[in-house]
Image: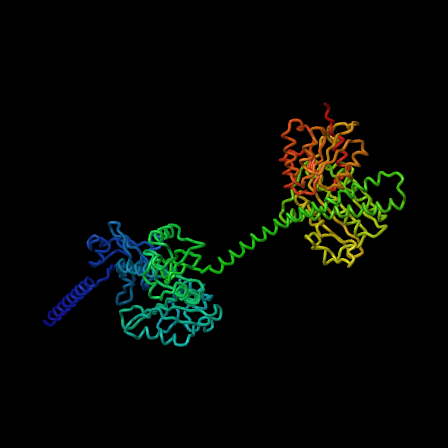
Amino acid sequence: MNAAPDSERTRTAAAAGIEALYEQRDLLRVTLESIADGIIATDPQGGVVFLNSVAAALTGWSASDAAGQPVDRVYRVLDNTGGQPIESSVLRALRGARAIALQNHHRLVDRDGAERSVNDSAAPIRNATGDLVGAVLVFRDVTEREEAERAVHRALSYAEDIIQTLREPFLVLDVDFHVKTANRAFYETFQVQVEETQKRSLFDLGNGQWNIPGLRDLIARVLEAPDPSLDDFEVEHDFPVLGRRTMLLNARRFPPSEAKAELILLAIQDISERKQQENSVRISEVRYRRLFESAKDGILILNAETGRVLEVNPYMTTLLRYQPAEFLGKELWEIGLFKDKAENETAFVELQEHGYIRYDHLPLVTKDGATVPVEFVSNVYQMSHRAVIQCNIRDISDRRRIERQLSEQADALADAGRRKDEFLAMLSHELRNPLSPILYALQALRLNASESEVHRQARTVIERHVMHLVRLVDDLLEVSRITTGSLRLRLERVEANALVERASVTIRAMTEQKRQTLSVSLNAEPLWLEADATRLEQVVGNLLNNASKFTDVGGRIWLGVERDENWAVIRIRDDGTGIAAAFLPHIFELFTQGDQALDRSEGGLGIGLALVKSIVEIHGGTVEADSAGLAQGSQFVVRLPLVAERTTTEEPSVPSPAPTTDALRILIVDDSVDGANMLAVLLQDAGHIPRVVHSGPAALQLAPAFDPDVVLLDIGLPEMDGYEVARRFRADSRLAHVLLVAITGYGQDVDRQHSKEAGLDHHLVKPVDLAILSELLNSVERHRK
């Protein structure tokens, strides 16, 4: 009877246990369903035995469809970085019978192929006896969180890029003033390295170069003050590497809206150059104001749009005699600078168009009606960001007075120069006239075959000194040509060897008298020049004359011609007294001479070498002087440009009439009785038939009856000058054929021009070289009736 109840109790207890297990299972299922994570349970072989609703939603598998399916089919994951399939955590937990910690960077592919980011973990399930009965996988959708993280990362990268591209240094500090981030500009500006900066205190950077007094407290206030920022705080500091710099600091706490900040943003602007510029501008403005106030010119500042006065300096008030207030708001014509409003407006328009006007002489009328000549300069420029007109007015009363004086002095000098030239011309005439009869008389004496030795020596001395006088007169007349640069050339093709030979003949008498040896060396080939032969002979003659003059009796002189590329080089060297080193640089200056003894036995006018230099340079050449010193001799080197050689070495023949053997009828017209008579004696001795008259009217009266072949005509005649006599000869058909030759003391270019205009055929200057006169007469074909 007792066995039955025991069996019933046992069944009842078992049923109660089973019911309790079901209740626990249901509770567990409800619990798992209420969890926000996806949960999948498997059997020991990896088949799905449970799938909560979150897992079903994430995988796309329902619990019924997933039941018994391999877990890696329901929960299919890819590597988040490479997109490759990977073994799920639950399978690894089953295989290793161990828990798998939280895994990230997985991509879950649901039943429809959609992907999402998940992280998961797994653990094995064991029964009471410790046997493996399955595994559980817990996973969560982290797609939104990753998107949020990526957004934050992008924002941080964006902010970092902005910081790095800032041209000014920028720091991000933590609340303890340690550097979290510094941009490239900071490293470059303050010449520090990243490893010396990151996580270091701002005040320790660069061996403490940012340990600026008060800066720590100042930035600290940004963390504590109601205002989360510090703007444009100026710091001036001596940096060890950069030197003294002025920095502008802008600091802001971050986040600015929260009471407790996490970061300090610090922007640093180096304004040292700007401060220097501001100081320079300030100094410039002070200097300008001082100049404006103290200037000895009047200065007006006008409105560029209206042309009315804005500012005036003190000197302007002195010049115009207005008070400063009387200038303000006025136009220039209202204060006496222009005649009227129309003239003022014309100047204003020109100024607006060109930005600048200038009047070298503008009459200014003062307040009391006085007229003052002024120089007026005006221009438009920017001042304090607006266009203004500055007018500078300079009183030129003293300058005008000086200009008038200079003009008067220039006129006086010109008049003096003209009178000097007239005097020289007259002096030449008066000196040449007595020289002519002396030379003619000496020539006549030379014809005396019975001349005694004493007479010959006396005549030679007179000839030599008369020729010296002639050279002095010639040099004296060249002064005005040298000083005015009016030396004129008659250019022709000239051969340098022949020119030098002719010039050397003129010095022979002087060298022979002093028993000097003159050695002449010519170039082997002809050297052709485009030159004035007479002038170049004058150059060589002057240099030879100097060489002989300053060489002792018995000394030597060398004259040479050679070619140096495209130059003809003429050298005159002597073993005479030489040239002092101090005098050598000035030797070619007009009226300059070396030291002379009181007797001036070797003196001159100081014209010859200046004339040499002028003539050579007009020919495009150069002349140089050299000397080793006193008593060391001297050398002069003339270089003249060559022209193309002729195709033949022979000079072109110049046809000339054969000398006539017939006597010429020659009329001499000269008021110098001695000169005319002595010339007549010489011409008669040469076989000609001379007649002498002493005035123009007498010549015109005698000429028709005498029927001269040649008329030797003085210019400076009484009653009627030689030019008028020549014109009348040419106007008379009976006398038009006569060769008219001027023989005169007037030898300037203007005199030669006048001779040509009057109809004279030749112009010879007294005293006439008789060889030249003889050659001219020999070329005349006698008129035959």
Task: Look at the image and tell me whether residue 163 can be seen.
Answer: no
Query: Along the line of sight, which residue is nearer the eye, 407 or 293?
Result: 407
Q: Position of residue 676 (x, y in %)?
A: 75, 39
- Number of labelled discs? 0
Residue 740 falls in which quadrant of the image?
top right
Q: Nearer the viewer, residue 106 or 502?
A: 502
The residue positioned farthest toward the top in the image shown: 785
Q: Is residue 232 left or right of residue 696?
A: left
Image x and y of residue 605, in percent = 72, 52
**Residue 314 visible in image:** yes
The reply, left or right, for residue 497 in relation to residue 285 is right
Q: Quadrant of residue 118?
A: bottom left
* Foreground pick, 380 / 299: 299
The answer to which quarter of the image holds residue 255 is bottom left
Q: Quadrant of the C terminus?
A: top right
Q: Is residue 621 left or right of residue 296?
A: right
- Residue drawn at x 19%, y 62% is 33
Say which of 95 and 506 sits in front. Answer: 506
In the rendered image, which quarter contains the N terminus?
bottom left
**Seen from this angle, which residue lies furthest left?**
1
- What's the image's color scheme? rainbow
Vertically, is 541 above or below 727? Answer: below
| Image coordinates for residue 329, horizontal then vertical, percent | 32, 61
Does residue 173 sit above or below 77 in this rendering?
below
Q: How far from the left and from the top, in percent, is residue 382?
A: 38, 58
